[in-house]
Image (cartoon, helix red, strand yellow):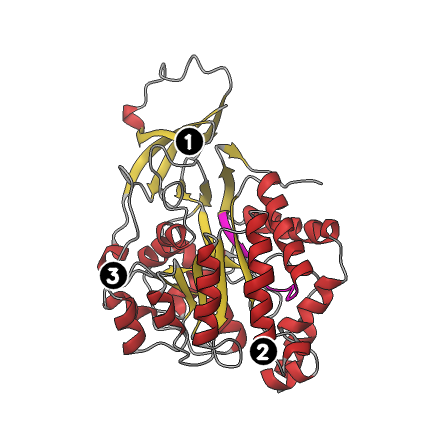
Amino acid sequence: MALLIKNIRELFGTCKGQQGVKNGGDMQKLESVKNAFLYAENDTITSYGRMEDLSSEQFSAKAALEVVDASGKFVFPSFCDSHTHLVYTGSREQEFVDKIRGLSYEEIARRGGGILNSARKLHNVTEEELYSESLSRINEIAGMGTGAVEIKSGYGLNTEDELKMLRVIRLIRETCPLEIRATFLGAHAVPEEYRNNRELYVGQVINEMIPMVASEGLADYIDVFCDEGFFTVDETERILMAGMKYGLIPKIHANEIGFSGGVQAGVRYNALSVDHLERSGDDEIAALLGSETIPTLLPGSALFLGLPDPPARRMIDSGLPVALASDYNPGSSPSGNMKLIMSLGCIRLKMTPEEVFNAVTVNSACAMGVGDSHGTVTEGKSAGLIVTKEIPSLGFFPYAFGSNLVDTVILRGKIWNPIVM
């Protein structure tokens, strides 16, 4: 199967040869080709360039050639969402209403809300039911332009249910055209029954969950919620070391609630990314500078919870790369709309359209470990693409924050249609 997209008004995110993460001032740079074409065979971008260089005979022998006319439209690499919790069951809108009525996070938790609420719900569904619910969210985000997504466990909080979640993620990986990465997050919260014996739960994560996750090959990464009221730096480091022994690469939830030391721990253990970072200052920025750990900001979560916005502008101006992700989850960010995340990056984090574009493509691809295959329009990379509707400029895409401006989504070189069970 071959695909030709022709008459592209402007093809953004082009890159000749492999390109890593974009740091600081490089995030302002955005390569493009005007009046362009793009050709892909099977899953792979084979060539692109200006329409004037496209020979009509070049593809005449391709019997199975699908042609997309993108006249007046832009083409982008598909979004890479490097931080989600989209495998869950049910919803938590009552907590949303309680918060509007003035209840604090602690009061909601005492009423049985929060992460433990989702864990109770997940315990009572089968893998088949969980897959069906999660597939609807995969269809949702794919339709909005996401072509690669990292999905975490963490609503199991016991061995059986954590494995259930990860097996569902594996099934999504096997049946869906998106690029999927799986993260084991058994250390998402301390279950109620272990509140007075945290060490026993940490031991269960280290000695029981991690070996079983590894034995089934269910995860690429290991994550810990290193923050006030969750897991300490010492606990985090012990869990990360245990995961690394089994080949799991660290990622960390850090500094959402307080200055937890999670950023510095992530850097020490060469974490692929440290995520959230609403509470970040000079020490955190200094720790990240010179490391290969990518700060990943989740503006949807900060907006939904009323948290301080993470200091994206300071990070970029200091020379750091920044990635943006949705944090799609039922409690603090019930949306996987990466176009909205771009808008929040501009509106709340004071990033330019070029910076947010790079933050949700090339940098987020690197933050989920797929930078060699996704995130840019590059010959040899996967043909995951977004064809926009007719819009006047790149800046209009995040500017029109409530409008659906995606016309066609292409995943693995084929026009995407919703997956039906």
Image marks 1 and 2: residues in contact by CB distance under 8 Å: no
Could you tell me the amino acid type at mark 1?
Thr
Q: Can you see residue 218?
A: no
Q: Quick check: 215 left or right of 318? A: right
- Residue with the mark numbered 3: 24
Relative image position of residue 248 (x, y in whole percent): 47, 54
Sequence-wise, the earlier of marks 1 and 2 is 1
- The verdict on residue 149 being magenta is yes
Q: Could you say whether the residue bearing mark 2 is in a helix, strand or loop? A: helix
Q: Quick check: 285 left or right of 232? A: left
Q: Could you say whether the residue bearing mark 3 is in a helix, strand or loop? A: helix
Magenta extent: 148-158
**What distance separates the C-alpha of mark 1 from that of mark 2?**
48 Å
- The verdict on residue 349 being magenta is no
Image marks 2 and 3: residues in contact by CB distance under 8 Å: no
- Residue with the mark numbered 1: 44
Q: Quadrant of the C terminus?
A: top right
Q: Could you say whether the residue bearing mark 1 is in a helix, strand or loop? A: strand
**What distance separates the C-alpha of mark 1 from that of mark 3?**
30 Å
